Image (spheres, rainbow, N blue to C red):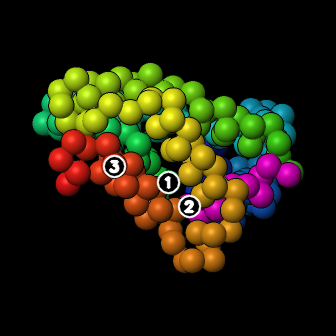
């Protein structure tokens, strides 16, 4: 039941952003709010759990990328840095910063999840350096550049102002970062 509610919450978030109401969610699920409240105490709790649900899906997608033996180190690194589960396509991620004011715990959880779990990514970076694919770079700096860019994408209006979809910005960032560390620069 919890996953069903979280999946529906993702769909409603896609349509309305963090402004969705529990009535919207109940209508999406064709169930009563009372039923939803037996699983989630309130919208704050739902949003917090929704963050973990979304990031857990991202981790599943990362595992699929890592397990794909037809991909090389560069493709795996690119895939992991730009991974986004299917049901996230079309979400306006620039609206996420709005969540920070009204739902600070959920927003803090987003930040925490973005900043953790870098072991695999940095391992691929090191593996690529050892294989002569990437030039040596400071892994902490690499992570900081990525994190700072994502934070800017999420907290600013620049993407919206320049009419750049979040996924285009993410893919562009990843392309620039990988081209910047490749030995042959292609």
> Is residue 94 in the magenta section?
yes
Looking at this view, name the residue that lies furthest to the left.
70
Give the mark nearer the N terminus: 1 vs 3. 1
Numbered tag placed on residue 88 in the rendering: 1
Q: Secondary structure at mark 1?
A: helix
Q: Which residue was labeled with disc 2?
A: 91
At which x and y percent is residue 23? 79, 57
At which x and y percent is residue 172? 40, 60
At which x and y percent is residue 13? 65, 57
Q: Which residue was labeled with disc 3?
A: 180
At which x and y percent is residue 115? 59, 32
Which segment did they paint magenta? 91-101
Image check: 14 left or right of 166?
right
> Which of the 4 quarters of the picture holds residue 120?
top left
Name the residue rendered at 21%, 42% in the picture.
183
- The answer to whether marks 2 and 1 mark residues whose Cβ atoms lie closer than 8 Å is yes
Q: Main secondary structure of the magenta part?
A: helix
Image check: 37 left or right of 82?
right
- The answer to whether marks 1 and 3 mark residues whose Cβ atoms lie closer than 8 Å is no
Name the residue rendered at 18%, 47% in the picture.
184
Image check: 166 left or right of 154?
left
Instruction: Tell me the crowding category of disc 1: few under 14, some 14 to 19, or many 20 or more residues within 10 angstroms, Cα based.
Output: some
Q: Is residue 60 above or below residue 185?
A: above
């Amino acid at each position: 039941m919890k996953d069903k509610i979280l999946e529906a919450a993702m769909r409603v978030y896609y349509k309305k952003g963090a402004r969705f109401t529990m009535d919207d969610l109940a209508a999406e699920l064709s169930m009563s709010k009372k039923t939803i409240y037996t699983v989630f105490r309130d919208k704050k709790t739902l949003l917090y759990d929704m963050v973990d649900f979304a990031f857990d899906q991202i981790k599943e997608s990362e595992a699929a990328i890592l397990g794909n033996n037809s991909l090389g180190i560069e493709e795996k690194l690119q895939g992991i840095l730009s991974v986004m589960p299917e049901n996230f396509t079309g979400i306006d991620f620039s609206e996420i910063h709005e969540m920070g004011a009204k739902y600070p715990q959920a927003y803090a959880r987003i930040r925490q999840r973005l900043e953790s779990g870098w072991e695999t990514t940095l391992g691929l970076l090191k593996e690529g350096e050892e294989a002569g694919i990437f030039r040596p770079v400071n892994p902490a700096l690499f992570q900081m550049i990525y994190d700072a860019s994502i934070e800017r994408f999420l907290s600013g209006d620049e993407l919206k102002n320049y009419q750049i979809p979040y996924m285009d910005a993410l893919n562009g960032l990843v392309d620039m970062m990988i081209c910047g560390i490749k030995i042959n620069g292609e």
